[in-house]
Each structure stands twice: as C-alpha cells, then as structure tokens.
Image: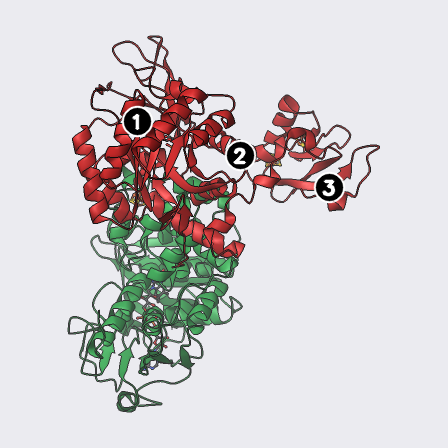
Chain colours: A green, B red
Amino acid sequence: MTRKYTEELERGYTALTVMEEAQRCLLCHDAPCTQACPAGTDPGRFIRSVRFRNFKGAAETIRENNALGAICARVCPTERYCQKGCSRCGIDKPIDIGGIQRFVTDFEAQTGMEILKAGPENGLTVAIVGSGPSALQAAATLRALGYGVEIFEAQEKAGGYLRYGIPEYRLPEAVLEHELSLIEKLGVKFQFKTKVGQDISLAELKERYAAVLLAIGASQAKMLDLFRDNDRVESAVSFLARVRQNHGQIDLPSNVLVIGGGDVAMDVSTTLKMLGVKNVTDVVYEEFCEFLASEKELRGAQELGVTIIDGYVPTECREGVVTFKHRHIDSQLTITVEKIILAVGQQVEAANLELPLVKNEVEFEGYQADTKVFVTGDIAHGDKTVVWAVKKGREAAMAIHQSLGGKA
Amino acid sequence: MINKDLSVEFLGVHFENPFCLSSSPVGNCYDMCKKAYDCGWGGVVFKTIGPKHFLIDEVSPRFDALTKEATPFVGFKNMEQIAEHSLEENLADLRRLKAEYPHKVLIASIMGTNEEDWTELARLVEEAGADMIEMNLSCPQMTSHAMGSDVGANPELCKKYCAAVKRGSKLPMLAKMTPNITDMVPVAKACLEGGADGIAAINTIKSIVNLDLQRYIGLPIINGKSSISGYSGKAVKPVALRFIQQLRSGIKDLPISGIGGIETWEDAAEFILLGATTLQVTTSIMQYGYRVVEDMKNGLMHYMEEQGVDRLQDLVGRANPNLIPAEELDRDYIVYPKIDEEKCIGCGRCYISCYDGAHQAMIWNEAKRRPDCDHEKCVGCHLCLLVCPVKAISAGEVVMKPGRQGDPASKVI
Ligand SMILES: Cc1cc2nc3c(=O)[nH]c(=O)nc-3n(C[C@H](O)[C@H](O)[C@H](O)COP(=O)(O)OP(=O)(O)OC[C@H]3O[C@@H](n4cnc5c(N)ncnc54)[C@H](O)[C@@H]3O)c2cc1C
Ligand SMILES: Cc1cc2nc3c(=O)[nH]c(=O)nc-3n(C[C@H](O)[C@H](O)[C@H](O)COP(=O)(O)O)c2cc1C
Ligand code: SF4
Ligand code: SF4
Ligand code: SF4
C-alpha cells in the first residue's frame, strides 16, 4: 500500500454521502454529542442543519463556535469527545461527526464564506505569545470583541503543533493555511521569529499592551537519560517538524526504531512508513490494554505495517543497539537500528516568562497569572488537545475581556 | 450568523417571518403555541375550533406513516378531527397568547356545521384577539358530512359559509382548501365571492397508507377496522405545489398561504416562488419538533442573499410564469446524457433503468463495467441521470430533432 504523505489519508464525504451519514443521526433531544464537545462546536445543531439541507447555516454554527472548525474536524479524537456518548451507539456505531464537520467546513471554504467578523475597535490591544490553536482562537475571540491583537511567534510561521507537529496526511497544509487566512483577515498581526523572553522581554510586552496572553504550549521534547548524546537519536517533534517543513522530502534509513505509545508515536511510525521506510518498529511501555494512542491512530499505523511491541522498557542503549525488558515477564529484547526516534512526551520551555509551572502546567486554576498576564492552551489546566486549546483560547480571551472591564 | 429581514405583509397583517404552524395538534394549546413562538415561528394557526354542540370523539391510535427503504415518514396519515379542547378553553388560550405575544400573528381556524355556527365562531375568535381567521373547509375525516372536505368540494356551500363568517367578523380571512378535488379554482373563486381574502392550501389528501397483510385491515387498526383519511408530509409537497400554481394561474395575484410537506428552506422557497406569501407546517414539526424552523429561516436568509433579494415578498410568484401548459413547451430538441467515466463507479443502474424503463440506449461494456450512450436510440429522457447514485451523468449535448429549426445553444436546459 503506498500512500502519499502530503495527501489526506481519509476520504471526505460528497454532498450525497454526507446526507446518508447525517440521516443516521437521531437528532437527539439534549444532544449528547453537543454536550460532549469541549469547544461547544454544537454537532447536534450543525448535523441537523445538514439534515435539513442548510449547509451554510451548518458552517455558521461550526465557525462561530470554533475558529478552527476545519482543523478540529480532522484532528479531534472524537471517540473521546463528541462521539463518545452518541445515542446512535444504541443501534450500531456513532455518527461520524468529524467527517460531517469536515464536509461542511470544506463547503464553507469552497463557497468562500467569511463567517468570522471583527467587532468595532475598542482601542485596546492584546499581545499573544505563541500562535498555536489556543492563540488563534483567542485572537479570533478578542478581535470579535474589538481588541487589537498582535501575535509574537518564535518560529517562522504560525500554527504551533498544527504546523510543526501533526503530519500533513492528517492535516493538509491547504486546510491550515485557509484557517489561518480567515483569522488574518480579522486584522490579527503576526510577528515571527520573535521569542519572548529572549528577543523581547515579557516586561516590555506588559508595558506596551493592555494584556499579555501566554500560549507557548509544550514545545520542547522530553529526553530519556539512556539516549542522551547519541547522534542516531532524534525527538519525535523535531522529526515531525522536519518532515512537514520539507513536505516529506527527507532522507531516511531503512530500519527505524520508535519509542513511545501515544498518538505522537503513532504519527511518527505512520509517517515513516508513508515515506517508504521498510522496517519501522515501535516499542511501547504500555501494554495494548492500557494503550494511550487513539484506536484510529493505532489502526492506521498497523495497517501500514508498523511492528508494534507492547509492554517493554528500554534498559540499555549503545549506538544503534537498544535493549528492552518486559515490564512483567522475564523477557528481553535487543534491536539494532540505524535511527531511533523518541516519542516520550513534550515539556514546557518558559525561560524568563516567570511562570509557576508544575508538571508542565501552571499551578493555578483558571487563566490569569497576574494583573496583566494570562495563560492558555497546553500550559493551562485541562486536556492537551487542539479542541481543548480552542476552548481554553476562547475562555482566556473572555477572562482578559472581563479583567479589562468588559462584560462576560 | 446571517441576519436578513424575513417579514412579509399578508392580508394586511405583518408577519415577522412567513413560517406558521398549520392548524393541527402542533398548535393545540397555549403551552405549545408559546413554545413555538419562542422557537421563532412567525405565526400560529390554532387547532381548528368547532361549535360547542359538535362533540369530538377521537379514535386510538390515529396515525400511520409511509416509509421507503430506511426513510420514515415519507408521508403521514392521520385520522384526527378538530380541537378536542372545549370552546371556552380554546378561546381562553387565544386570549392569553395574544396578550403575551402581541407582535406574533395569531390565526384562528374555525369550522361550523351551518351558517349560524360559522358566524358565531368568527365573532368569538375575533373577540378573543385573533389577527386572522382561517376557515377549515377541508378536513377529510369529519364524522359529519356537513363539515370538512365534503363542504370544501362544494363551491356554493363554501361561498355561503364564507359570507357567514364575514357577518361575524371583520378580520382578514383565509379559506383552507381540500386537495380532494380535480380543480381548486372554482371553489377558491366561490370563497372569494363569499368574502374570503385569501386561500390556504392544501389540507390533507384522502388516503390508505398501509395494510396489515395478515388481518386484511388498513392501518391504523381501530377495533379491526380502518378508514380512508388525510395524508400529509413530504410526499404531498408536489401535489400542494401543483394546486398553488393552478390557483395562481387561475386567479391573478391570489394571496396564498402555502401548506403541504414543508420541511426545509428549499421546500419553503419553492412554495414562495410559486406564489405563497406565508407558509404553514405540521408533519415535519410532528416528526422533528418546532426547531425545524431554525434551519428554514436561516437557509431562506442565505437563499435571499444568494439571489440578491432584500424583501422576501419580491420572490413571491417568481416561478409562476415559467410553468406553462404542456402544449406550449418547446419539443424541438433532445438533450443527450453525458457520462463522466471518472465519477462512474460501475454499478450499471443506468443500464438497467434505460433498458427496462426507457429506450435501451445505454450500452453496457462488460469488460470495463462502464456505460455508453447510443445516440441513435437515446430519446433524452434523463431517467439515467436520476438513478445514477453518484451523479456521474449530467445533461450533455443539445441537438435539434430532425427537420426542426433553431439554435441548440440558445436552449435553456
Ligand atoms: C505530533 C503531535 C500530534 C498531535 N496530534 C493531535 C491530534 O491529532 N489531535 C489533537 O487534538 N491534538 C494533537 N496534538 C496536541 C495539540 O497539538 C496540542 O494540544 C496543541 O497544539 C496545543 O496548543 P497550544 O496553543 O497550547 O500551543 P502549541 O501548538 O504547542 O503552540 C505553541 C506555540 O508557541 C510558540 N512559542 C513557544 N514559546 C514561545 C516564546 N517564548 N515566544 C514566542 N513563541 C513561543 C511555539 O513556537 C509554538 O508555535 C498533537 C501534538 C503533537 C506534538
Ligand atoms: C394530525 C393532523 C391533524 C390535523 N388537523 C387539522 C385541523 O384541525 N385543521 C386543519 O385545518 N388542518 C388540519 N390538519 C392539516 C394540516 O394543517 C396541513 O394542512 C396538512 O397536514 C399538510 O401540511 P404538512 O404536510 O406540513 O403536514 C391536520 C394534519 C395532521 C397531520
Ligand atoms: S448524539 Fe449522535 S445521534 Fe444524537 S444528535 Fe448527536 S450525533 Fe446525532
Ligand atoms: S436519456 Fe433516457 S434514453 Fe437516453 S440513455 Fe438515458 S435513460 Fe436511456
Ligand atoms: S448509474 Fe452512474 S455509477 Fe452506475 S454505471 Fe451508470 S453512470 Fe456509472
């Protein structure tokens, strides 16, 4: 099976097939799907609009509740959120909410709808540090409330892990660019290659802006001591960013070991396979019954022929020779590879940003760090997913609005 | 969210939007109408109120539905008569609704057994605060032949009762038509002569929807028997649209409240384009709830935006001139089907339908599993377009029939 890294893996619905899926929806009272969407995207409402042939209205519902509707449609772990409690499970399987959302947002893009609007200017400007999903949603919400928004981003381009993490076959470049263009059109200004705490100080931002929102995410890879200073070792996020920036055009050996069992490890393994690496072995600490990766991602990796070995911990690494021990039984495994990719989690890097961090989260509840500084995204409490970043982005924007005298 | 003015003026009454509950259980009492108004409906036609002396005694069960494959409620059958609540209760509900929703439209549907009844009911509902009266001349399952569609099929009686209503009330008045006749125009004209200001159409169509095959009884079964009764919902839309078109071509600029199978904004737009100014809905509410109005309103706003129209009224009747008698249609050309081989998935349905239901013009390439159209045989009926599951077939080349004059490129297809 050959699949292209730059081509979307999942096939989208057509105007005909989306009606078939929407017709499976039971149009529930108090729709459980709507209650379960962290960002309040309101699937019960937009599926009903599709069902009654009002695609434009469906697009309005999605976009007004979720400035990254087309992205969430593709990357949301729906089985954990909206689809989890779907009433249709009482008959067979949940409605493919992400798929319907994708159809509607594609329709929105094709018809050139511009649903998000900026509010009348209120004269105040907010600085946002980082340009990941939480920053982008916060920017859209703040613009709607009439605030000026200036984004400071350390990288060359906007998007955070939407650009430098999630692979293109799951989130095509064109979709990301379109979502970004909608937010840019609201009048959000971007300053790239500017690392706050290094190129410009937090103090300066606090002085220049009405408020500062830190949306810096967990942008640094975690390392295991065993693998330090080994030039065959690369972190998952560094690898994924490299592939993405080069649209898949990178050189790779034929035998790669991946360590980790979350979605990021699945992304790495699947990407390697798509790029033509012959032997991809993923060794995972968790056993299958306690797996962290979503079923969909795990299935995707397995379908492409990734060898997944569960329940092993690495105990020794010399160059390309890695030894593992099983966590519960007496079993040892030695693998010799040309390259090792570590997908063992990410951590927050917040030098000079005066953040009280515990386990990669701020230690306080809510979004306000001090009178002028707010936090959102992965560094705030809550799930570390795009849809939660959207939820937190909007809530943090509302918190800023309230602290500046606006009404909820 | 788009926001456009959907308001219309109809018989001198201002509707904030054209969407109304049609007279039926969906507008049976105060609480229901209140919820409907709060959901955004522009008006309510309250469940038909009858005279005090006519006792309502309903059957149980009283509904059935036609299904096709997995689609429930293609059409809906009911055996219900008019309001079950007492006259006093109904009038009290009207009063309370008007007091609490002065800007929403309240229409009282009434039905009498004789002239005195009609006059008296008209007087009572006006007194209770209704903005408009709708005469129910059309319920097909009344237990009295002096009521319902038997009356609605008789122009003389209709005229007499319309005049009776006008004696009781000065309110603008709609006469609600039965589709259980061949030509609605003479009845509508009689109603206008009697004093009606506009026409509501259609009420339900007499029907038998399903039978119990083991016991040889129509559904629903009422102690071993069933009756012919009214059919509504999506399946009746084509019939309703046809009557509305005929009314508009028979009576110029006739004010119409359109009813029958409205479920989506597209259905609503069709009724408007054929001449309805306001719209009434029952079956889709019974199936899905008052919330259906949200997408009807929003979708209609987007449609107006696409059409570049700011007043909904400007769309009323726009399609009327484009429906002409069959003998006036241009019969000089054929439109051949065009097959998109990329889109085609090789199911062969077009082949089957063309062979068994058209003109044996689709040739089936067994090796390729793809169809090909033989223009020698094809008559351009487009059955194949309709059956293709992936819309791989579209209207293609236009050619003049042998011996006919004209420019194929000028044809609006
Ligand atoms: C490989 C991978 C795959 C994932 N797949 C999914 C998925 O399928 N579904 C899902 O829901 N979630 C997924 N996630 C998680 C999701 O991407 C994150 O939860 C989300 O991106 C967090 O958003 P954020 O706004 O907090 O910031 P991030 O996306 O982390 O972005 C932070 C941004 O801030 C910038 N920044 C950091 N420090 C500074 C500074 N000092 N000055 C200026 N800029 C700075 C960074 O350069 C970066 O652009 C995935 C994550 C990874 C790594
Ligand atoms: C259960 C039921 C009861 C009805 N009762 C009345 C009635 O009391 N008065 C009346 O004028 N029409 C009555 N109707 C007809 C509807 O008002 C409407 O004309 C018809 O159902 C077609 O519209 P629809 O397809 O939207 O349902 C009734 C219809 C149904 C389904
Ligand atoms: S829970 Fe499932 S069936 Fe119910 S409205 Fe949501 S998507 Fe439809
Ligand atoms: S248009 Fe009619 S006759 Fe021609 S190929 Fe299609 S089904 Fe056959
Ligand atoms: S019906 Fe459509 S998909 Fe099926 S064979 Fe004909 S053209 Fe192809």
Decide which of B45, A95 is in the foreground and name it. B45
N-terminal of the pair, mark 1 or mark 2, is 1
| Image position, residue A227 (x, y; %) | 32, 72
N-terminal of the pair, mark 3 or mark 1, is 1
Identify the residue at image location x=49%, y=67%. A252
Mark seen at residue B251: 2
Identify the image quadrant of residue B403: top right
- Whether residue B219 sits left or right of residue B250 in the image: it is left
> Which of the two marks, 1 or 2, is nearer to us in this view?
1
Figure quarter occupied by ligand 1: bottom left
Report the amino acid beneath label 1. Answer: Trp
| Image position, residue A332 (x, y; %) | 28, 57
Q: Which residue is mark 1?
A: B118
Q: Tell me how far mark 3 sits from mark 1, CA to CA.
A: 59 Å
For label 1, count other residues whose C-alpha is less than 10 Å away and answer few (under 14), some (14-19) or many (20+). Answer: many
**Of helix, strand and loop, which one carries label 1?**
helix
Report the amino acid beneath label 2. Answer: Ile
- Say if disc 1 is inside 8 Å of ligand 2: no
Whether residue A65 is visible to the viewer of this picture, yes or no, is yes
Q: Which residue is mark 3?
A: B397
